[in-house]
Amino acid sequence: MDFGTVLMAIIVVIGVPAATVGYALLTERLLKLVRPQRRAAVRPWLWLLPGFAFLGLYLIYPTINTLILSFQNSNSTEFVGVENYATLLNQGGFWQTMLNTGLWIVFFAAVVVLLGILIAVLADRVRYETAVKALVFLPLAISFVAAGVIWNFMYDFDPDRGTVNAIVGIAGVEPQSWLTEWPRNTFMLIIVGIWMWVGFATVILSAGLKGISTELLEAARMDGANELQVFFRIILPLLAPTIAVVATTIVITALKTFDIIYVMTGGNFGTNNLATLFYAERFRAFDAGTAAAVAIILLLAIIPVMLFNIRRFQAQEAIR
Amino acid sequence: MTGDARVDAPPRVDTLAGSGPKWYNRLPLHVALILISMIWLLPTVALLVSSFRPSSEILTTGWWNAFTLPFQFTLDNYQEVLSRDNMGTSFLNSLFITIPATVIPIMVAAFAAYAFAWMEFPGRNVLFILVVGLLVVPLQSALIPVLQFTTNIGLTGTFPAVWLAHTGFGLPFAIFLLRNFFGALPREMFESAYLDGASPTTAFFRLVLPLSVPAIASLVIFQFMFVWNDLLVALILVGGTQDVAPMTVTIANLVNSLGQGWDRLTAAAFISMALPLVVFFSLQRYFVRGILGGSVKG
């Protein structure tokens, strides 16, 4: 280890935490400069300042700036009106990208939610519930990059290496090149996403399930309801708010998915979604204007979810 | 967790070792669950087993052959990838990126959350709704200007560039979670502290932070995992600089350059997974609590 590394380690472990604590201590010093009766009014702004400085600098201002960039040319030197959007809409590849994004939203979200409910309900009935949930949850701790390597290996063309081709080979199917043919490749990538995110849905839905009163379910069974009726008439309606939370999170994840596609196909073979198209426009085609337009389209797609979240938050606050 | 008790009771039948008629009824349930668990584990096991096989074996025979005689396992792939492919440096870089990118946003968020939960000021609701709205804003819609701005102040290719960006991007969730937790602390506690002459700063460090250890712990795990596993931000802000690149970037480059060099790729992927998996298994309880607190807070 050289000197630079050691110095960086000291900064990272001691310097950074000390600096943040130092700020809080500094606020009281600063307040001493203010008249005592004004201190209560000034104090909250000092505590909010660092947070909103970061939010402003890294989220609010850049998002507004991206909107402006989307109406400018590739190196942001002059305004071109809606030309970037028009170029995108006239590209054949763009519609494929939109279609992929739609496939991700529909299939990824649907399968993750359905499998999540299924595993949560089934696991709820056995003693090794915790173990099942931990196993299903495990992929979420892995980076998308590592998951990409794992699944590239699974999908390898050679049936002497690729597990998937070895398995379909048992059924007599010829080895397939899973990631080169559209639209099959998009579904193969969605499977990787499902593998990673089902655990998330399972854990939340399972917690929601535990919140349903045992007496209620027992009463229904006493009245002669069978397990399917109990599930569809009682569990499912009561679980609906939790399902909505999971679904919105998963839809956002689907829209933002970048790493899986970047690592596994690089967006080739027609697998781009909006997130990877953004990257390709900015860092391969070096067209900041079109890239910004893609980002704005992505943002527009997310706005309904944002409004839904705000509504839900306000409803919760009203109950508090 | 006693979730199973309510479904079968009464009377409770021992379902695993039991021999009554119940056992047959529940067989499909067990088969389904075990099948799901195995499918979910299979890809990771394939990678793990392969990473310990000699490279000549990986490239010519399936990983499942590793369990036939003669057993051939080796650490060569790990040695190779650590010495030749910059993985050692990248591991350190990942730590140097992740620790501050976890500490800074959580402290900054705690300050803001404290103000939101326990201080009066005009615009409190509107500002908090802004935070809730920012929760879902995609990174992509901010990245181009962030890169520009980072370049302008000369930080591209340095650790602080990534720390600051992750702070900004991680803040909405952290503020949201902590404000909900801080807000649930008892009011009387603050009143008696102030009566004893404590300043809000003292109350923050002596009361709020110690009492919020569970929420902070889950947030730490969350942010840690998020930053450790991040590719996009690192790729864009330090991607071109080998000395600073974290493991995700290095592995993504390896995928491009090695293609099917599974001997080194599998080892590299597993090195990057090791730390999150340890964190996950040792702190799973907090991790799950963080997910629940962030999404189904009632």
Image (cartoon, coloured by chain):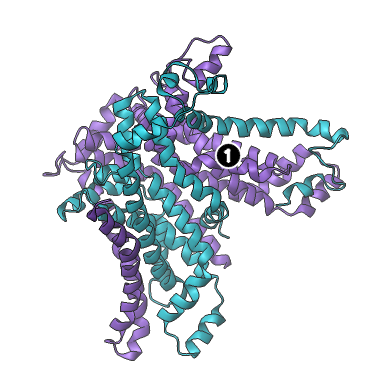
Chain colours: A purple, B cyan
Q: Which residue is mark 1?
A: A136
Side (left or right) of A58 relative to A155: left
Q: Amino acid at mark 1?
A: Val
Asked whether residue A143 appears in the rendered view, the answer is: no
Picture coordinates of residue A301, whole percent (x, y): 39, 42
Residue B251 sits in quarter? top left
- State the image coordinates of residue A277 (x, y, percent, origin top left): 30, 34
Give the position of the C terminus of chain A as an image quadrant.
bottom right
Residue A214 appears in the rendering:
yes
Element class at badge 1: helix
Q: Residue furthest left?
A: A77
Using the image as rendered, state which of residue A75 and residue B228 is in the foreground. B228
Q: Position of residue B297 (x, y in %)?
A: 55, 59
Which chain's residue wears label 1?
Answer: A
Give the answer, above or below, for where B172 lies relative to A168: below
Give the class, few, some or many, for how many residues have Cα within 10 Å of label 1's Cα (few <14, many ≥20): many
In this view, the residue farthest toward the front is: B70
Q: Is residue A199 above or below residue B52?
A: below
Q: Give the residue drawn at x 32%, y 53%.
A: B96
Question: Which percent across, then down, holds residue A300?
Answer: 36, 44
Instruction: Name the residue: 52% across, 56% down.
Output: B290
With B221 as the anchor, is A78 left or right in this view? left
Side (left or right) of A233 relative to B210: right
